[in-house]
Image: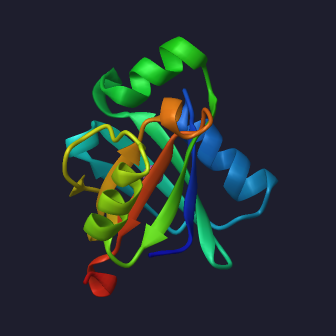
Amino acid sequence: MITGLDHVAIAVADLEAAIARFAEDFGVPLSGREDVPSEQTSTAFFPMPGTRIELIHPMNGEGPVAASLAKRGEGVHHLCFRTDDIEADMARLKEKGYRFLSDAPRPGAHGTRVVFIHPKSAGGVLIELAEHPEEGA
Ligand code: CO
């Protein structure tokens, strides 16, 4: 079951400049940074009540965020729904015709398991599902 908006991810070309924008200009405190090698992505987190903004940047200049920056430039990249049972939500949505970018959940930031719904099957929006370890079924 989808239980909330986990985060909104923004692809940025210059991670340090983007961190400064959110932390200093917008005054939203940076809570942490994490590299996610499985996605070749460096991330920085800005929690807000009930959710967080997540800046994403290519690790070592490669990977899916590098491809996205080259194709579409900077901007909102995906939104992520929190789920309490990722396999059940995948099965339910697959039955309704949604396509996924991988056949099974993969390791995400914060010890989550994540999977992405193809934007072509979701009205042009890239949607991630994330199950946090403490909420797993
Ligand atoms: Co995400």
Q: Position of residue 24 (x, y in %)?
A: 74, 55
- In what quadrant of the picture does the N terminus appear? bottom left
Indicate left or right for 69 with 73 as reference. Answer: left
Name the outermost residue toward the top: 71
Q: Nearer the viewer, residue 133 or 56?
A: 133
Q: Nearer the viewer, residue 66 or 21?
A: 66
What residue appears at the point 48 percent right and 53 percent down from the top-left corner? 44
Q: Quadrant of residue 53?
A: bottom right
Indicate left or right for 21 with 121 as reference. Answer: right
Say if residue 112 shows up in the picture: no
Question: Quick check: 29 above or below 114?
Answer: below
Say if residue 66 shows up in the picture: yes
Question: Quick check: 65 above or below 7?
Answer: above
Indicate left or right for 113 with 116 as reference. Answer: left
Q: Position of residue 115 (x, y in %)?
A: 32, 51
Q: Position of residue 29 (x, y in %)?
A: 65, 67
Question: Quick check: 104 above or below 75?
Answer: below
- In what quadrant of the picture does the C terminus appear? bottom left
What residue appears at the point 51 percent right and 63 percent down from the top-left corner? 81
Q: Position of residue 126 (x, y in %)?
A: 52, 40
